[in-house]
Amino acid sequence: MKISRRGFLAGSATVTAALGGTRLGLSAVQSKSPASKRTLVYLFLRGGMDGLNLVVPRSGVHRTQYLNKRPNIAVPYNQMHDLNGAFGLHGACDGLKSLYDSGKLAFIHAVGMPEGQSSRSHFDSQEMYELGTPGNLATTTGWLARHMNTSPHIASYATIPSLATTSSAPTSLLGDFRAMSLDDASSFHPNSGRYGDEHIRALASIYDGNSSLDYAVRNSLDMIDLLEQIDITVPDSYPNTGLADDLGLVAGMIKENVGLQVATVDYGGWDTHNGQGNDGGGYFATHVGDLSAAIKAFLDDLESAGLIDDVVLVVHSEFGRRVRENGNQGTDHGTAQPMMVAGGKVLGGQIYGSFPGLRDTDLYLNTDLRMTTDFRQVLCDVVGNFLLNPNLSTVFPGYTGPKSIGLFDTNSIFANGFE
């Protein structure tokens, strides 16, 4: 279903007894169990982000090879933050560096799909990541939908268990019929009145069956009612960007206590085939700086509300870029990339995974950063050890690799009542 600033109905959003129940209220979700309070925010960087200019080789042979293969677009020392001596973070990412230093952000380098199952096509690669089935585009549900449909920790009374901040739900939520698409809650306030109420009652009466359409319409009416009761305004502490607005909307929904367990956010503009920027500046620096500032504002907002331990943010893209810059001072479609995982429960301040190297013999197909960590290992860690869904073989069918990369202190999680 889609509820946007353009509105679903022009009338009242009061859902009455015609729905077979009473008007929705927010109090119903106050008694959530500890596990069902947790929220995963899945931020997808569409276009293929250049991870090597985000998490940058800083020393030794990796640095030498990086400079040789990127003579014009390499990030210089004076334009990067030192992470661990071996790697640096792009200098435009002050917010991410602060989160990393405070132990709330972890990087996992050289993440991707198994060799032979990946794709350099934007469409195919995005689909396979969001389906959670590398090498298979025929899967009929998304990995987040399979989580939502199998998790034992999603309260039945949650009013908005899953949310997409886009005009329609992404592939990762394909098959989750409860997923709500909402691009701007604060500007959706239909005018109440007699005829609006009658319209709602009429729709509820018409769609009172058991089909998927009946269910979707009743869910839409429920959501309209809920949105009449809340007013989410993104705080002034957020940057004035579209990404910040989307993350602010998600934070607002979390703070409104509507039972949100999964939210998806998109941020495009990463297809940097030309004019990527040099000396640590230019287009990529501006774009990655906006990403950094929005993520920092989001997590600061949640920390101020005392909710940062209940949220994990996962960030990745459909592929990284090729190691060698091209003739237009940009980068072409590649393979492996770094992922980011952030939140109060994340064992941050570390770079996980194994870096494969940048020598010609180290590269995949002599062009790309080679994958050393399957993306499903990272997501299994989040789904299994943070969201506490044990059904990982259903969420990621066919995956038999490690189910954790060490992002969480599971003893601490289980000791605090999250068994």
Image: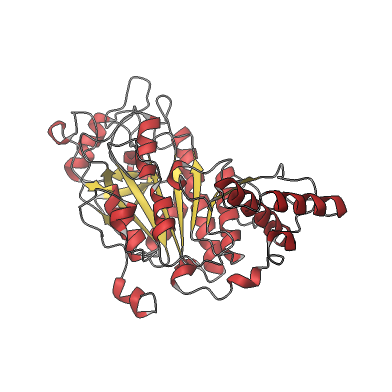
Question: Which residue is painted at 75% across and 52% down in the image?
Answer: 200
Is residue 238 shown to the viewer in this render? no
Task: State the image quarter where residue 359 is shown.
Answer: top left
Task: Tell whether 278 sits left or right of 364.
Answer: right
Task: Tell whether 390 sits left or right of 311.
Answer: left
- Residue placed farthest to the front in the image? 209
Task: Tell whether 48 sits left or right of 84.
Answer: right
- Residue placed farthest to the top in the image? 327
Is residue 336 shown to the viewer in this render? yes
Q: State the image coordinates of residue 114 (x, y, percent, origin top left).
A: 22, 41
- Residue placed farthest to the left in the image? 361
Q: Nearer the viewer, residue 392 or 335?
A: 392
Question: Which residue is painted at 19% across and 33% down in the image?
Answer: 364
User: Does residue 369 lie above or below 342 as drawn?
Assistant: above
Question: Which residue is painted at 66% across and 45% down in the image?
Answer: 4
Quarter holding the C terminus? bottom left
Q: State the image coordinates of residue 165 (x, y, percent, origin top left).
A: 56, 47
Q: State the image coordinates of residue 288 (x, y, percent, origin top left).
A: 45, 42
